[in-house]
Amino acid sequence: MANKKPNAIKVLFIGNSFTQRNNLPQLLTEMAAVREVAIEDDLICMGGASLRTHWDAGRAADAIAMGCYDYAVLQEQSTLPVKNAARMAENIRLFDEVIKKGDAKTVLYMTWARQHTPEAQEVIADAYNTIGEELGAIVVPVGIVRKNFLAEHETPVLSPSADGD
């Protein structure tokens, strides 16, 4: 986090390919710049990783504790909210405690259902919204927005394998 602009919003992204593909942190930074908002972003990413994997590795928690971030964006492994929403909530609670100690705000990046199981979106949304409400976190409903967009438009091509972790 050296040489960060003092007025920039500092955002740490923690996730897997859903965050890394299509360079989400840079995309957000560029979109904000159009509105003359400076964002400085960092990304901690492991392909297919759950938040528990990131927690156990320690790098993400250390970055939060030392990084002076304004926001930490958490993206859980895409199928965990469906397979085990309680485990997902535990993982997010671990990070939320560290994020709040660092005077940052927790942001939950809601992923989307896999193409062959669109009915899972409701379960995914419920898992993110439930833990988000409990913790007072910001929930960014990407999965819901994507579902609504696809209901009215042809499938956009985001990357060669944007459907999976």
Image (cartoon, rainbow, N blue to C red):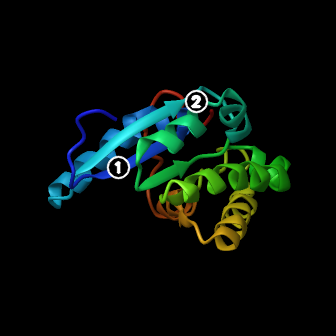
* Quadrant into which the C terminus falls: top right
Q: Is residue 109 visible?
A: no
Q: Quadrant of residue 115?
A: top right
Query: As drawn, is 28 to the left or to the right of 84?
Result: left
Query: As drawn, is 119 to the left or to the right of 73?
Result: right
The residue shown at (25%, 40%) is 4
User: Crowding near pointer 2: few (<14 within 10 Å), some, many (20+)?
Assistant: few
Query: As drawn, is 115 to the left or to the right of 155?
Result: right
Query: As drawn, is 124 to the left or to the right of 163?
Result: right
Q: Quadrant of residue 100?
A: bottom right
* Quadrant into which the N terminus falls: top left
Q: CA distance from mark 2 to mark 1?
A: 17 Å
Q: Quadrant of residue 143?
A: bottom right
> Could you tell which of marks 2 and 1 lies nearer the N-terminus?
1
Task: Label 1, secondary structure: give it.
Answer: strand
The residue shown at (65%, 45%) is 76
The residue shown at (14%, 59%) is 36
Q: Kindly identify the amino acid type of the residue bearing the numbered disc 1.
A: Lys
Whether pointer 2 and pointer 1 mark residues with C-beta atoms closer than 8 Å, the reply is: no
Residue 95 % position (x, y):
64, 49
Q: Kindly identify the amino acid type of the residue bearing the numbered disc 2.
A: Arg
Q: Nearer the viewer, residue 110 or 104?
A: 104
Q: Is residue 65 visible?
A: yes
Task: Label 2, secondary structure: give it.
Answer: helix
Q: Nearer the viewer, residue 42 or 19?
A: 42
125 shown above or below 62: below
Residue 85 % position (x, y):
81, 55
Residue 8 % position (x, y):
24, 52
Please name the residue that numbered disc 1 is placed on.
10
Residue 147 % position (x, y):
56, 60
Q: Nearer the viewer, residue 95 or 154?
A: 95
Please name the residue that numbered disc 2 is placed on.
59
